[in-house]
Amino acid sequence: NALAGNQWYRNGVAIKDQNGTSFLASTSGVYTVSSTIDGCTTTSNKTVAVTVNSYPAVPLISANGNLSFCYGESVLLTANATTGLQWMKDGMQIKNATGSSYSATEPGYYTVSATLNGCTTSAQAGALVRVKQRPQAPAILANGVTAVCEGGVVSLSSMANQGNQWYKNGVALNGANGIVFGAATTGTYTMTVSADGQFAVSDPGSGIRQPGWHGVSPV
């Protein structure tokens, strides 16, 4: 509280050119100050111990899976630290997400911060998660009866314009990717529609067993 003649010390050693009424300590140590007037010096009987904590290492994020996935799936994000973590999505803290791993199910930019002794550092590179919407489950239209004589063909049509894959008894039919498929052998036929790397399965398909539609009514 002296206005003039001050000298600041760290661990008993005078700090060069630090003679003001205040001092900004940025290094751990025990600090004190003396005041000199007319050649008479008085040292404060009070010391202040300052501790400067180090920042934790910058956490790194790894993804156990593809960062782009279909709706209803997830990707496991893992940080290379174990304590003091906080996961964030688009800059906002995720409630109760403080473990070393986080299962991301929503699209967004995920980062993680690490805190040690009150000092926080954030990951420099986050993980951009993209969630793709699945197409609507396709309907199959049987163009006519589904029971035919040997040598006959049942014409099946997909209500989707693109991305079709036809199946017989759960096995993909090679090259059967069109809107229309001619079924010539007995079996249960289904199809999938791919859009943006996703797929939806028809429910439940058309079987050549007896006349009529087997499954959901075509739309």
Image (tube, helix red, strand yellow):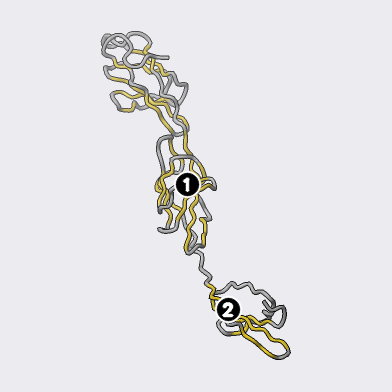
The residue identified by callout 2 is 31
Residue 165: percent from the left, percent from the top?
39, 26
Q: Residue at x 69, y 90 (%)?
A: 40
Q: Earlier in the sequence, mark 2 or mark 1?
A: 2
160 vs 86, nearest the viewer? 86
Residue 191: percent from the left, percent from the top?
37, 24
Quadrant in the rendering for residue 67: top left
Looking at the rendered structure, the secondary structure element under dot 2 is strand
109 vs 197, nearest the viewer? 109
Q: Which residue is drawn at 40% across and 19% down?
A: 139
**Lateral position of residue 28 relative to residue 160, left or right:** right
94 vs 108, nearest the viewer? 94
Quadrant containing the N terminus in the rendered view: bottom right
Identified by mark 2, the residue type is: Tyr
Quadrant in the rendering for residue 21: bottom right
**Lateral position of residue 12 relative to residue 188, left or right:** right
Q: Which of marks 2 and 1 is in front?
A: 2
Residue 9: percent from the left, percent from the top?
60, 82
The residue identified by callout 1 is 94
Quadrant in the rendering for residue 157: top left
Few, some or many residues within 10 Å of mark 1 (<14, 14–19, 20+): some
Quadrant containing the C terminus in the rendered view: top left
> For residue 139, which numbered disc appears in the image?
none
Residue 154: percent from the left, percent from the top?
34, 13
Q: Which residue is drawn at 66% across and 74% down?
A: 22
Q: Residue at x 60, y 82 (%)?
A: 44
- On screen, 63 above or below 107? below
**Lateral position of residue 113 relative to residue 146, left or right:** right
